[in-house]
């Protein structure tokens, strides 16, 4: 008889007996989804309602010990399709824990508020007013940014990195973060040289 430990938040763990029956998990996301646990076990699901049925996959038992995987179950990203009674029962008990229910609710409301802010951004872009942004190029003297003010249309102001005429050639070095900030990822050799000298 083999045993499975279910990872539980905190120090608790549930021990259940495992039968030969595989644990089948269904992916509810629209697109292909990969889960990899801390030990490198990896399973790929096709998106929901995959015509070949590849949205349902057997998982390694190790996943049941991964709190990250159990969190995905509690969020509903993955759902239990079938498993031995022991595993089903242990999972149901686990997923019904108040801590996980709260976590799942928090996650759901965060997802909802992110959708709202995405709509706000879209509305924002309808605005054609001119606003002023500051050049993110390197300061001509000392450290910091250039800060030369550049008038841009409010609409689409986040689509290009703000750079003045002197710095616009540096644009390819900037990448946008998910929260619409810009980071400089590469320094031109000349710039590196300058910063070493100064
Ligand atoms: Zn500049």
Image (cartoon, rainbow, N blue to C red):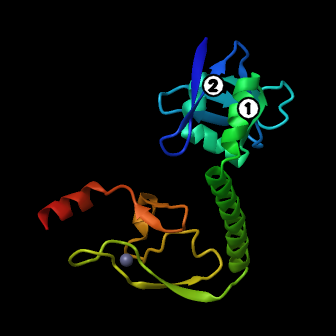
Which type of secondary structure does the marked residue at label 1 adopt?
helix
Question: Which quadrant is the N terminus positioned in?
Answer: top right
Q: Give the x, y percent position of residue 85.
A: 76, 24
Point 53% across, 32% down: residue? 37
Which type of secondary structure does the marked residue at label 2 adopt?
strand
**Image quarter of residue 142:** bottom left
**Image quarter of residue 172:** bottom left
Which image quarter has ligand 1? Answer: bottom left
Q: Are marks 2 and 1 in contact (CB under 8 Å)?
A: yes
Q: Which residue is mark 1?
A: 89
Question: Can you tell which mark lies on residue 16?
Answer: 2
Q: Can you see residue 57?
A: no
Q: Give the x, y percent position of residue 21.
A: 73, 16
Q: Looking at the image, is mark 2 or mark 1 earlier in the sequence?
A: 2
Point 65% across, 43% down: residue? 72
| Mark 1 burial class by Cα count in 10 Å: few <14, some 14-19, many 20+ | few
Real-space Cα separation, disc 2 to disc 1, in angstroms = 9 Å
Residue 173, compared with residue 88, is above or below; it is below
Q: Is mark 1 within 8 Å of ligand 1?
A: no
């Amino acid at each position: 008889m083999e045993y499975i430990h279910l990872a539980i938040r905190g120090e608790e763990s549930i021990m259940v007996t495992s039968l030969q029956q595989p644990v089948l998990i269904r992916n509810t996301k629209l697109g292909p989804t990969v889960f990899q646990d801390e030990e490198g076990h990896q399973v790929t699901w096709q998106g929901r309602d995959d015509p070949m049925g590849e949205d349902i996959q057997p998982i390694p038992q190790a996943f049941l010990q991964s709190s990250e995987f159990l969190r995905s179950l509690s969020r509903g990203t993955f759902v239990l399709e079938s498993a031995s009674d022991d595993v089903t029962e242990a999972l149901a008990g686990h997923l019904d824990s108040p801590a996980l229910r709260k976590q799942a609710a928090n996650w759901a409301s965060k997802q909802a508020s992110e959708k709202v802010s995405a709509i706000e951004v879209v509305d924002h872009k309808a605005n054609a007013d001119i606003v002023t942004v500051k050049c993110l190029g390197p300061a001509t003297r000392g450290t910091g940014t250039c800060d030369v003010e550049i008038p841009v249309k409010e609409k689409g102001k986040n689509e290009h990195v703000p750079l003045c005429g002197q710095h616009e050639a540096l644009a390819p070095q900037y990448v946008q973060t998910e929260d619409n900030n810009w980071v400089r990822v590469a320094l031109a050799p000349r710039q590196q040289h300058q910063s070493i000298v100064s």
